[in-house]
Amino acid sequence: MYNKFSIYTAIAYANGKPHIGHAYEYVLADAITRYHRLLSGNDKVFFCTGMDEHGQKIFEKAESLDKTPQQLVDEITQDFKDLDVSLQISYNKFIKTTDEIHKKTAQDLWMKMYNKNDLYEKEYEGLYCIGCERYYKESELNERGECPDHLKKPILFKEKNWFFRLSKYADQVRGLIVENKIKIYPEERKNEIFSFIEGGVEDISFSRSKKLLTWGIEVPNDDTQVMYVWCDALTNYLTAGREVNVWGDSNMLNVIGKDILRFHALFWPSMLLSAGEENVQDILVHGHILSNGQKMSKTLGNVIDPQEVLANYNQALSANSSLSEWVSSEFFRYFILKNISPFSDGDVTHERMKELYNADLANGIGNLTNRIMKLCTTYLSDGYRPEPTEFPIEYTQSMQKYDVKSAFEYIFKLVSDLDNYMQTEQPFKVIKVDEEKGKAMLHNMRTQLYTVGRLLQPFMPRTSDTIKGLIKNNQMPEKPIFPRYE
Ligand code: MSP
């Protein structure tokens, strides 16, 4: 165990705007980061996110838009950075794979693997889909012989590639997972990797001819070749971690989606073993966000744009909320963290979002804060001076397992307990007949509400600050925190 923590999201393909699935990953990783900052202090936690900017798809898209690839990726990167601001993603480092320092790290890693004799050349002939940037087996194509994703016939291509001896490391990586030296959350995902390894692991193609791929990092020992995605993209973590000296000197966590598990739980650990670098200890594998029960796709037209959701909620609420334009960001973070388990897929619909906003935020925590503060400002003369207390064990245990939803549910249990207390014990009546007792009850309620505020910090930072501020200053919110969404 190290006393530092470093957290890395996947880096998104710079080939389109961010969707709600990306937003989910960032909010999830941000909540975990903020929790660790609370526990250990800001300087002990490093949080990295960024963009995956190379590849033929990006090159071709830029050409079709009459832009240079760099222009295109810079523009798309800006969309992701804007989303990070809107969602309060508190990263320490935003890495781009076109950064010069990253290219150097990727080439350095390549040479370490090459010197270990783990990279070798092989002639390869196969059916190549430019869109997917990969070769297909005939059995993987549809009945018309097309790539199932792009519905285009792949081209027959013969080239010389560099290959990485993945087969040499598969058992060793398996061992690391069995011994929990690489921990995969949730447990079930382990089995996916084990059965993949049992099915037989082949070496992987590690480079592309410059004829097929023009926008990438040069292979240091062969000027006819460019690195394929593995050494180009996965290495971003090492670049970022090394820059601030936390690689191998912190508890390292990857937060990734289920579709890229194999790359992070087998390919990347094998590459690190080959190069003699430290491995990541924890991999949190989240599910996918579905839109109205279906996978999001441009063809179905059901892709949810997080910026649209935020704009929508702000238009309806920001003028009447004491959080002003941050009300939508706080809501979005709440919705995604409290209602979707990191360990399974989660469905998002506009109806459900609105329903939960009104139930949990407007009528729930917002209304409760209002009622408690109304009584406190009427009957108590002083603000509250919080005393340092430990976090409840239910909360910390959940967060330790990255079960953010359970930790959040624990907070909402406190909220509903407080609601029930208000209803059954009726402090507003008691105080009229027994002032001492009534005051003690109100003090007890604001202490509990303060705990709610404290525990909300990693998830809803501004709501947390607002609630704590009101209690400390013994004030009513000027406007409701969460006005009703009609
Ligand atoms: N560029 C690769 C990752 C390379 S990491 C060295 C990539 N990019 S991506 O843009 O397609 O996805 C970025 C992250 O978002 C991945 O972790 C992916 O699993 C996640 N998601 C993509 N679609 C998603 C949903 N619909 N729901 C939740 N997460 C999703 O993969």
Image (tube, rainbow, N blue to C red):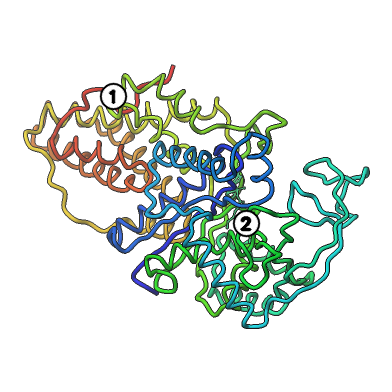
Figure quadrant of residue 300: top right
Expressed as whole percent of the image width and height from the top left, the position of residue 450 reads 24, 43
Could you tell which of marks 2 and 1 lies nearer the N-terminus?
Answer: 2
The quadrant in which the N terminus is found is: bottom left
Tell me the SS state at disc 2. loop
The crowding category of the residue bearing disc 1, from other C-alpha atoms within 10 Å (few below 14, some 14 to 19, many at least 20), is some
Q: Is residue 473 above or below residue 28?
A: above
Question: Is 406 on the left or on the right of 4, as rendered?
Answer: right
**Three-letter amino acid code at disc 1?**
Pro
Residue beneath the point at 16% across and 48% down: 386
Question: Is 327 on the left or on the right of 336, as rendered?
Answer: left
Figure quadrant of residue 116: bottom right
Expressed as whole percent of the image width and height from the top left, the position of residue 349 reads 58, 30
**Residue located beneath label 2 in the image:** 216
Q: Is residue 460 above or below residue 163?
A: above
Expressed as whole percent of the image width and height from the top left, the position of residue 229 reads 65, 59
Towards the viewer: 428 or 228: 228
**Residue located beneath label 1 in the image:** 480
Residue beneath the point at 41% across and 60% down: 397
In this rendering, the label closer to the viewer, 2 or 1: 2
